[in-house]
Image: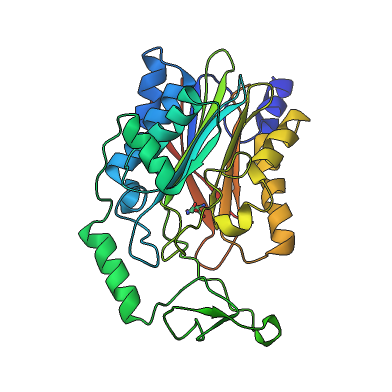
Amino acid sequence: MTTFLIYIFMLPFGHATLPLVINTWPFRDATSAAWSVLQAGGSVLDAVEQGCSRCEVDQCDGSVGFGGSPDENGETTLDAMIMNGDTMEVGAVADLRRIKNAIGVARAVMQHTEHTFLVGESASVFAENMGFTAEDLTTNKSLSIFTQWLKDNCQPNYRKSVLPDPSKNCGPYKPRAMSKQRQRERQIDIHAHDTIGMIAIGQDGHVAAGTSTNGANHKIPGRVGDSPVAGAGAYADSTAGGAAATGDGDVMMRFLPSFLAVELMRTGAAPSSACKTAISRIKRYYPEFFGAVICANTTGHYGAACNKLPGFSKFSFMVSDSQSNIPLLKSVDCF
Ligand code: SD4
């Protein structure tokens, strides 16, 4: 009995049962959609695709998918990726225009090309040729975010070392000498969720992971974040586990946190500690970065970690496994 109790207390965050679906933020319907696919005998890739697609249709929390994060021109563009942890195949798209189902296009890149990553207008043409519907991704909401931003003299924005002073003026901008530049605080909205990252692990240990996002409000046209980059936004390896990240992708992608977390789980680290180490690595250089990582290993243990900031002390994520059979909201204290 004592040994049993000790064992229970030693268990890392989360019980270990397979299959498992875990995703960033409280996007319950996305978890449900992925779980239903697994329950119906579908593959983990289908689960991740369907789960993330739900957010692309429903605009989870009003923030993922079309009608969000208008860029400096007011346009919404999408980034997405999907990874098969059995074969290590990846399909990804970035700066995708006019197509709502970005993760569907990422899956098409994986299944119908020898490539990994398509971007921009050409990715949209590829999608249209593959039968995806072209639609306007602008909504009244994204239009009003954009209009307000113009009224606010294009604040906040991502420019630096340019003229006119980007902290007071709209563009067009020209480069200015680096020496005169004062590092401005990064303007990240920690309440905008923008991104779904999901991991699905089958009964047989097959791991898949994926992401879908509209990126960052007022991004510079052409900007690609971490979400569609394998090892940054998500990573899957059926010999170790899966991970997915959310937050300030411009910073996070420099550290490949999802890859790092999976590699740590391979060496035996518990998922929560793998996630923590991935966050710590970024924190060392960017103590104020906004971000979180979810991790799951092939035995069905899972965990998450986030960087504590004023206004961001807990990170919420969703889990579905055979113990609960319905999506459960979990949260972790940031550190
Ligand atoms: C990006 N990582 O494009 C995404 C944004 C995000 O919560 O995750 N927001 O930088």
Relative horizontal placement of residue 282, taking residue 216 as reference (left or right): right
Q: Is residue 29 depicted above or below 5 in this figure?
A: below
Residue pictured at 23% horizontal, 56% vertical: 139
Residue 190 position in % (x across, y down): 47, 62
Q: Nearer the viewer, residue 300 or 76?
A: 76
Residue pictured at 47% horizontal, 30% vertical: 109
Residue pictured at 55% horizontal, 20% vertical: 17
Residue 72 position in % (x across, y down): 40, 67
Q: Nearer the viewer, residue 111 or 305?
A: 111
Residue pictured at 56% horizontal, 71% vertical: 186
Tally of numbered discs: 0
The C terminus - image quarter: bottom right
Res 216 quadrant in image: bottom left
Q: Is residue 255 depicted above or below 180 in this figure?
A: above
Residue 225 position in % (x across, y down): 53, 53
Q: Residue furthest right?
A: 267
Q: How is the image coloured?
A: rainbow
Residue 256 appears in view: yes
Q: Nearer the viewer, residue 110 or 195?
A: 110
Q: Nearer the viewer, residue 32 or 75?
A: 75
Relative horizontal placement of residue 70, taking residue 315 as reference (left or right): left
Relative horizontal placement of residue 32, taking residue 24 as reference (left or right): left
Residue 327 position in % (x across, y down): 40, 32
